[in-house]
Amino acid sequence: MASRGKSINLFLMDGDAGGRIKCTLANWTGVAYKIPRTELDKCKERRKNANVNEQGVLQEDMLFTSPSYAAMFVIDKSVNGLTSWKDERGKTLKSLESLDTE
């Protein structure tokens, strides 16, 4: 059986190849990220400087480049945002996105 080519999409999150890169593979539901170690420290610093009240509620709008980055901001560790974010019924973001494509 002959092997078939694969389509890989690379999104330069910071606009250059030396920064953060989001990778997707055609016909695969996962996402991969390449984040330089220096950027991880910046993410932690952003979390430390955030305006959060006593109940832990963020007091300002913050833009994140991916669901995983937003989840990492909230729980302070690397995590898959597509499976971590859930709606009030317990449906994951991944399952909700797959409904949009049907």
Image: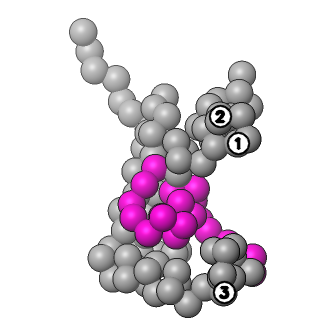
Whole-percent x and y of residue 83?
52, 42
Q: Nearer the viewer, residue 93 or 39?
A: 93
First in sequence: mark 3 or mark 2? 3
Task: List the residue tagged with mark 3.
Answer: 51
Could you tell me the amino acid type at mark 1?
Asp
Packing grade of label 2 (10 A; few <14, some 14-19, many >=20) is few
Distance CA(mark 2)–CA(mark 1)? 5 Å
Residue 17 visible? The answer is no
Question: What is the x, y in percent for residue 28?
Answer: 46, 32
Q: Name the residue under label 2.
A: 91
For image coordinates 43% across by 80% down, the residue present is: 44
Circle 2 SS class = loop
- For residue 87, the mark is 1
The amino acid type found where label 2 is placed reads Lys
Image: magenta residue range: 60-80
62 in the magenta segment: yes
- Indicate yes or no whether the magenta region holds residue 64: yes
Tell me residue 70's x, y (percent): 57, 64
Quick one: label 3 or label 1, which is nearer the N terminus? 3
Which residue occupies the extreme top position in the image? 1
Q: Do the residues labelled 3 and 2 touch (CB within 8 Å)?
A: no
Which part of the image, by quadrant, shows the C terminus?
Answer: top right
Q: Quadrant of residue 78?
A: bottom left
Tell me the quarter of the image containing the N terminus: top left
